């Protein structure tokens, strides 16, 4: 198994880096043709999703390099990967996925 860098270890062990009472985008992986994302829900459940999947947040419409676009109640909302030093809150309204994302 490959060891994580000191920077990765530091970022992964920050206290209060994410709000655990709200959905959090934990990671994005896979190829650009078949992206997948990992979401943590407030109850602690973690799901791996791909474009087209229905989740507790809505339907996954696109996965970008650092974002997940979800359609819910006629709107598209976005979850972003946490950035160093940022405290992640909740879904944010978003009009449309950018050209950089992969639509379902």
Image (tube, grey):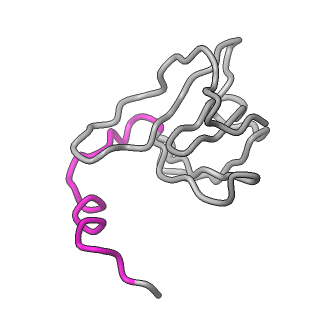
Residue closest to the far front: 99
Query: Residue 22 at x, y = what percent?
Result: 42, 34
Query: Residue 13 at x, y = what percent?
Result: 25, 62
Q: Residue at x 75, y 36 (%)?
A: 54
Query: Would you place residue 74 above or below residue 35 in this image?
Result: above
The residues colored magenta run 3-23
Magenta stretch: helix, strand or loop mostly = loop
Q: Quadrant of the rendered structure where residue 14 is?
A: bottom left
Query: Would you place residue 17 above or below residue 56 in this image?
Result: below
Give left or right: position of 83 versus 26.
left
Q: Quadrant of the rendered structure where residue 103 is?
A: top right
Query: Residue 29 at x, y = what percent?
Result: 59, 58
Give left or right: position of 69 versus 50.
left
Query: Residue 25 at x, y = what percent?
Result: 49, 44
Query: Would you say residue 20 sits in the magenta stretch?
Result: yes
Q: Residue at x 66, y 52 (%)?
A: 36
Q: How many marks?
A: 0
Q: Quadrant of the rendered structure where residue 90 is?
A: top left
Residue closest to the far bottom: 1
Q: Residue at x 48, y 26 (%)?
A: 91
Q: Residue at x 26, y 46 (%)?
A: 17
Give left or right: position of 8 versus 57.
left
Toward the viewer: 28 or 18?
Answer: 28
Quarter the C terminus occupies: top right
């Amino acid at each position: 198994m490959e060891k994580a860098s000191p920077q990765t270890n530091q970022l992964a062990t920050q206290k209060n880096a994410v709000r655990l009472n709200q959905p959090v985008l934990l990671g994005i992986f896979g190829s650009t043709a078949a992206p997948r994302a990992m979401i943590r829900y407030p109850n602690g459940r973690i799901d791996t999703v791909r474009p087209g999947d229905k989740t507790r947040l809505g339907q996954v419409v696109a996965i970008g390099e650092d974002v997940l676009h979800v359609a819910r109640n006629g709107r598209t909302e976005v979850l972003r990967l946490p950035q160093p030093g940022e405290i992640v809150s909740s879904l944010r309204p978003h009009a449309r996925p950018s050209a950089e994302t992969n639509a379902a």
